Amino acid sequence: MDELIKRAKELLEAGTVKVVIGYENGSADKTRALFAIEPKDADKLIFDSRCVMNLATYITKAEVKGKGKMAITATLPVMRAIIQLASEFQVNDSNLLVLGITPESKMIEFKDLAEVEAFVHKYTIEIEAKYSEKLEKLDKMTPSERWSFWIEELSPCFKCYACRAACPMCYCHKCTVEFNQPQWIPVPSHDLGNLEWHMMRAIHLAGRCIDCDACYNACPLGIPLNLLTKRMLIDAKEHFGGYQPSIKADHLMSTYKPDDKDNFIM
């Protein structure tokens, strides 16, 4: 994308930003993250249908933030992640400039995050039909059938945590799974440990997941763990009026309202 390369060079040459985060060609016909620091680095920038990694996962990293103001190539899912991170005080206008890529593959440079938010809100989060069908089948199962389904699906997991590394919302310096005093999640990759890890991850993303599928795309075993977060998105819509990332929005899991439904209490 010539326009993206040109603008990235201009921003770096002028010193407006210190690093431009984007995509470049990797190995095996895949893309990887590019951190352009010098104007000449911008020549490596690309954008095509292979660019599905959520680059927002890098903007909370200390080693990237420490370089100074960042610019980021942002597709719609990346923009959603940025707005959610802004609502959690992880990024702001002083340290981030967004070079948006529209669903029509056109570049838009946003002057601030408020403009990004307004753009994002033009597009509602919709669960793809292929996933809706799978979720409907799960809904029709008995609790014991669903239990068996997930035990079987999660059994290959060897806890590489690639799903956590790829998710822009997993930015804790120390994850719950890394605590051993007390040890909340079993370390071994057995049925219970795998189930507890993936359920905990999904619950931590309730009201925060922006449905980018980064976790699923990163899983080396192709485990359909994104079905868990998509279920959470549907529940948020059914029980709490929907979800759309907003800079000043109340967080679903940390906000109590007197009129919240309590029919889940047995």
Image (tube, rainbow, N blue to C red):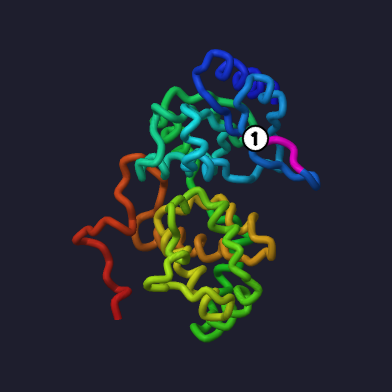
Q: Can residue 139 be seen in this view?
A: no
x then y, percent, for residue 29: 79, 44
State the residue position of label 1.
34
Q: Give the range drawn in magenta.
A: 22-26
What secondary structure do most residues of the magenta stretch adopt? strand
In the picture as drawn, the residue positioned furthest to the top comes out as 14
x then y, percent, for residue 112: 42, 26
Q: In this view, does 27 lie to the left or right of 241?
A: right
Q: Is residue 117 visible?
A: yes
At horizontal 62% and vertical 71% (from top left) the residue drawn is 157
At horizontal 39% and vertical 54% (from top left) the residue drawn is 242
x then y, percent, for residue 24: 70, 35
x then y, percent, for residue 119: 47, 33
In the picture as drawn, the residue positioned furthest to the left comes out as 258
Q: In which quarter of the image is the C terminus?
A: bottom left
The part of the image, by quadrant, that contains residue 99 is: top right
Foreground: 178 or 42? 178
